[in-house]
């Protein structure tokens, strides 16, 4: 072969190869541009479209052959046909082969080499496609991507197909002669070379696409995870001036921080604006530590204030990722997550508050907030065990608590206890402790040995507590008594000191005119005796063991019986006949007065309702009714229960309580008058200001104190006072009863000077119910 012939052959082949390569490149560009469209198609449509595109490319190569000698064409149709099956599947390869053969038949005569080339290329591609997972079923797609190894196999198979095709032609001597071998070798090598190049390009593109898809899927998963985490994922850095820079912030920032992630990336300083002012030092310290370096993870907690004002807790953990390969703009890069731990913090706070509340309840009284008995005893024990154990314990007891609860209600009783606690806390000196020891009892513990200071404090407590508590316009008594004991002499521990103070307190309750008592050794014995006496009295009152006697009241004009005064008596098997003044005073001191008055009223009205002649009945009332309770309601209940006529009942009260509790007295007297019950002043003349109030009190009778009757027959001074009272009462239309009349001379003087009614031993001793009552009972039996 001459050099000119070779050059001519190479030039011709180069021109043809260039045309075919341009055609293949154009087809590859079309596939690349339409790749997403083709991939989005259903498998069958994608196979048909791909087969048509590849078949069209193979057919077009007929019109741009590498070599043409008569009816023989040399082209690169083997390349697209070989790649059809691995890219679009066997069905696409068959369709492309059919199109290529059809185009050959239409353009030129149908030749065996063409069939060998087309069929061999389709078969070669289908063989590799099968390894990739393709099947003739259009619904099946490749399970594995095309790799460089597959590209080499395709190139070798293309070499075989090209060799068989053009070998057949060469064997037919269609290309024999000078210059025939060069085109044959070039064409045989061109097909596999181009196939390898395009297969590698496709494999690389698929790998890149797979990498992009994998990266996108990974980012999507990370984004989904980040958006569902109870916190914010972020990547932060420090700028050239040490400022905070965010290179990434997850979308959860909007939910947790109340600020969009984009805003934080654009303006990292926004985070510092959200940090709670009390916690900003934590964030700045963490940033400074991060700038100093170190591979350890950083963890801290701080609060942020969202734009809507809600405060949230964040637990932030970050890890420095790398320091090398950083840009000049960022001096440090770290990644982290900020968890929203608000619920956890609130739960911890609630648990802590619950623990504190539990501990507080163990040592405090829930109603008043004062220390309880247990905490007080612990405090006393600790102090008495110290090197300086001197101390004073003041026990305070509110009087008449049971009656307050009965007449004002339990809610008022609770309010009274709170008020007492407030007053005690206000006057207790520093270093001392106030406690509620139970019920209506309180205590003040003074860890000092100054007994005089303890006495002054006790008197001050009694004075402060003496002021009533006004509730709904009514005075609620707050009076208290105080018992004092001193340690360690009177108690080596808390229990002993409390016992001694309790004995002193009971002694203070026993004496009506004493509000403070200090413990003495004799008090224990006396208190045991008094406690036994009080218990016997309580049993007598509640068990109906008391009896009533009645003393007649007569008119001076004819000594006509008009009424009786009911007097209560107590005959005890051990104490004997107990004087009425003694046990009545004790009943008032222990709070039994209301029960005692109800007993007397009920028994007297029951016995007197059928007396012959219907004389009126006079009953004494305790002065305590004018401080607490509803005496009008109590009397109404008795009248309703017994059927005793209200017009026959009159109640006696002392003049002192009427004057000292004037407003309450007016209200009660008006209420009794509304019932039809008369009111009289007992022991009139024993209080210095009684005459000044007499014209202002709407009373019905007065009972002159017995001291006047005893002297009226021989003392001019007594006569002058009695004459004045009789004259004044006559003008005021108030009846007068002279008590204590024992002689005829006294009776005569009183009758001569207009005293309408007398009562005393002269006209009748106290005795059992009149016989008329017993007769009446027999009639009603």
Image: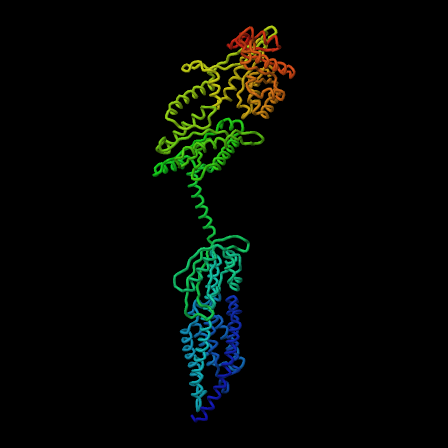
- Taking depth in this image into account, of 165 and 276 the one nearest to the observer is 276
Whether residue 433 is visible: yes
The residue shown at (42%, 72%) is 147
Single out the residue that lies furthest toward the front. Answer: 716
The residue shown at (51%, 12%) is 549
Q: From the viewer's perspective, is residue 69 above or below residue 144?
A: below
Q: From the viewer's perspective, is residue 763 above or below residue 175?
A: above
* Residue 623 coordinates in the image, percent (x, y): 53, 22
- How many numbered discs? 0
The answer to which image quadrant residue 669 occupies is top right
Quadrant of the rendering where the N terminus is positioned? bottom left
* Residue 83 coordinates in the image, percent (x, y): 46, 74
595 sits left or right of 736 in the view: left
Single out the residue that lies furthest toward the right. Answer: 731
Q: From the viewer's perspective, is residue 144 above or below residue 597?
A: below
How is the structure coloured here? Answer: rainbow
- Taking depth in this image into account, of 755 and 766 the one nearest to the observer is 755
- Taking depth in this image into account, of 628 and 228 the one nearest to the observer is 628
* Residue 738 coordinates in the image, percent (x, y): 57, 12
* Residue 497 coordinates in the image, percent (x, y): 38, 32
């Amino acid at each position: 072969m001459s050099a000119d012939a070779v050059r001519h052959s190479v030039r011709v082949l180069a021109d043809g190869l260039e045309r075919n390569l341009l055609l293949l490149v154009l087809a590859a560009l079309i596939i690349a541009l339409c790749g997403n469209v083709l991939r989005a198609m259903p498998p069958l449509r994608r196979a048909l479209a791909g087969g048509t595109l590849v078949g069209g490319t193979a057919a077009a190569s007929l019109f741009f052959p590498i070599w043409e000698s008569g009816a023989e064409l040399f082209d690169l149709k083997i390349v697209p046909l070989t790649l059809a099956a691995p890219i679009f599947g066997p069905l696409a390869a068959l369709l492309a082969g059919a199109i290529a053969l059809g185009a050959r038949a239409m353009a030129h005569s149908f030749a065996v080499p063409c069939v060998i080339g087309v069929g061999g290329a389709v078969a070669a591609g289908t063989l590799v496609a099968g390894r990739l997972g393709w099947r003739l079923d259009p619904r099946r797609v490749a399970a594995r991507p095309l790799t460089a190894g597959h590209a080499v196999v395709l190139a070798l198979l293309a070499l075989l197909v090209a060799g068989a095709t053009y070998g057949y032609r060469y064997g037919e001597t269609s290309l024999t002669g000078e210059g025939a071998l060069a085109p044959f070798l070039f064409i045989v090598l061109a097909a596999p070379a181009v196939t390898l190049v395009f297969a590698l390009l496709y494999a690389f593109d698929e790998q890149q696409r797979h990498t992009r898809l994998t990266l996108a899927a990974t980012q999507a998963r990370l984004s989904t995870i980040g958006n569902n985490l109870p916190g914010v994922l972020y990547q932060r850095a420090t700028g050239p001036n040490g400022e905070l820079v965010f290179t990434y912030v997850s979308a959860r920032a909007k939910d947790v921080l109340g600020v969009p992630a984009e805003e934080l990336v654009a303006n990292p300083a926004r985070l510092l604006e959200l940090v709670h002012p009390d916690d900003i030092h934590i964030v700045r310290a963490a940033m400074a530590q991060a700038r100093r370096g170190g591979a350890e993870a950083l963890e801290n907690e701080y609060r942020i204030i969202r734009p809507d004002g809600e405060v949230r807790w964040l637990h932030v953990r970050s890890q420095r990722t790398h320091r090398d390969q950083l840009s000049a703009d960022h001096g440090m890069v770290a990644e982290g997550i900020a968890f929203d731990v608000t619920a956890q913090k609130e739960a911890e706070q609630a648990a802590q508050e619950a623990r504190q509340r539990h501990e507080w309840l163990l040592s405090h009284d829930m109603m008043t907030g004062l220390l309880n008995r247990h905490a007080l005893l612990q405090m006393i024990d600790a102090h008495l065990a110290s090197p300086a154990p001197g101390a004073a314990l003041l026990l305070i007891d509110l009087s008449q608590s049971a009656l307050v609860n009965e007449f004002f209600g339990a809610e008022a009783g609770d309010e009274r206890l709170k008020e007492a606690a407030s007053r005690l806390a206000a006057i207790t000196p520093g270093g001392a402790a106030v406690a509620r020891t139970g019920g209506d009892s309180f205590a003040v513990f003074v860890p000092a040995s100054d007994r005089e200071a303890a006495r002054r404090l006790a008197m001050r407590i009694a004075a402060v507590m003496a002021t009533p508590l006004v509730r709904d316009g009514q005075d609620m008594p707050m009076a208290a008594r105080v018992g004092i004991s001193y340690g360690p002499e009177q108690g080596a521990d808390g229990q002993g000191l409390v016992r001694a103070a309790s004995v002193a307190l009971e002694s203070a309750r026993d004496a009506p005119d004493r509000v403070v008592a200090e413990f003495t050794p004799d008090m224990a014995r006396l208190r045991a005796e008094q406690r036994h006496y009080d218990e016997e009295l309580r049993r007598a009152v509640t068990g109906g063991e008391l009896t009533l006697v009645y003393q007649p009241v007569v008119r001076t004009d004819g000594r006509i019986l008009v009424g009786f005064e009911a007097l209560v008596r107590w005959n005890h098997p051990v104490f004997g006949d107990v004087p009425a003044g003694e046990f009545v005073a004790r009943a008032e001191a222990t709070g039994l007065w209301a029960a005692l008055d109800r007993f007397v009223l009920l028994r007297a009205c029951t016995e007197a309702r059928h007396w012959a002649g219907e004389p009126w009945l006079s009953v004494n009332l305790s002065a305590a009714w004018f401080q607490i309770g509803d005496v009008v309601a109590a009397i109404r209940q008795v009248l309703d229960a017994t059927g005793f006529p209200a017009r026959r009942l009159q109640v006696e009260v002392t003049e002192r309580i009427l004057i000292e509790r004037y407003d309450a007295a007016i209200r009660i007297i008006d209420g009794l008058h509304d019932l039809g019950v008369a009111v009289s002043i007992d022991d009139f003349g024993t209080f210095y200001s009684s005459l000044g109030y007499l014209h202002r009190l709407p009373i019905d009778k007065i009972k002159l104190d017995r001291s006047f009757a005893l002297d009226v027959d021989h003392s001019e001074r007594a006569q002058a006072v009695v004459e004045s009272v009789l004259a004044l009462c006559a003008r005021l239309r108030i009846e007068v009863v002279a008590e204590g009349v024992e002689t005829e001379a006294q009776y005569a003087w009183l009758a001569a000077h207009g005293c309408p009614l007398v009562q005393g031993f002269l006209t009748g001793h106290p005795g059992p119910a009149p016989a008329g009552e017993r007769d009446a009972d027999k009639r009603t039996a």
